[in-house]
Amino acid sequence: MKHQGLFMTPDQIAQLPYRPCVGIMLANPRGHIFVGQRLDRDQDAWQMPQGGVDKGETTRDAAIRELWEETGVTDKLITIEAESAGLIPYDLPHAIVPNIWKGKYRGQEQKWFLLRYHGTDADINIATEHPEFSEWKWMHKDELVDNIVPFKREVYEKVLAEFSSKL
């Protein structure tokens, strides 16, 4: 769908597909969750690692790749404990749709994975080839939703509902 300039109507946005994506809840042995502060934001914008699924890639492989690309954590330091039953979509705020992913997607549809982390804090390296985070920390699950950008809060509530018994 072509759009002129940096504006799209709500109807144009509603016709766009969701971007196939994975989300990663990386939990340490105490059940605290990895979150990173996004580099491209000028205010607090903590989030769990996430990213697109490449053509021909399984969601599981995409989750392991994205984890490594964003945190430096390899598959040798994690165990996959759970995955979401289905895909969890979210819509981007309308004002930013034309500026992200060339205006091709209305938001993302994510398959979520709960990964148990077996490494140490020293094994985490956010200074990756294409860094996404300026800092990171372990966050208690009860603090997670309140510290996430508002348009992703419903997604995080659903992910927590599915995975919290394993945290």
Image (cartoon, rainbow, N blue to C red):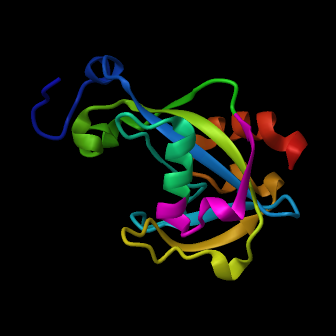
Front-most of residues 37 and 147? 37
Residue 108 in the image, given as x and y percentages of width and height: 45, 34
Is residue 151 in sight in this rendering?
A: no
In screen coordinates, is 46 left or right of 58? right
Residue 31 in the image, given as x and y percentages of width and height: 85, 58
Q: Is residue 159 above or below residue 142?
A: above
In screen coordinates, is 1 left or right of 38? left
The residue located at (14%, 29%) in the rendering is 3
The residue located at (79%, 63%) in the rendering is 28
Q: Is residue 64 above or below residue 35?
A: above
Front-most of residues 95 and 48? 48
Tell me, yes or no, whether the highlighted magenta stretch contains residue 74: yes
Q: Residue furthest front?
A: 76
Magenta region, residue range = 68-83
Front-most of residues 27 and 97? 27
Residue 123 in the image, given as x and y percentages of width and height: 65, 77
The residue located at (38%, 34%) in the rendering is 56
| Image quadrant where one finds the N terminus | top left
Residue 64 in the image, given as x and y percentages of width and height: 56, 52
Q: Quadrant of residue 94?
A: top left
Q: Quadrant of residue 93?
A: top left
Q: Residue furthest bottom?
A: 122
The residue located at (86%, 50%) in the rendering is 167
Q: Is residue 134 above or below residue 102?
A: below
In screen coordinates, is 101 left or right of 72? left
Is residue 11 in sight in this rendering?
A: yes
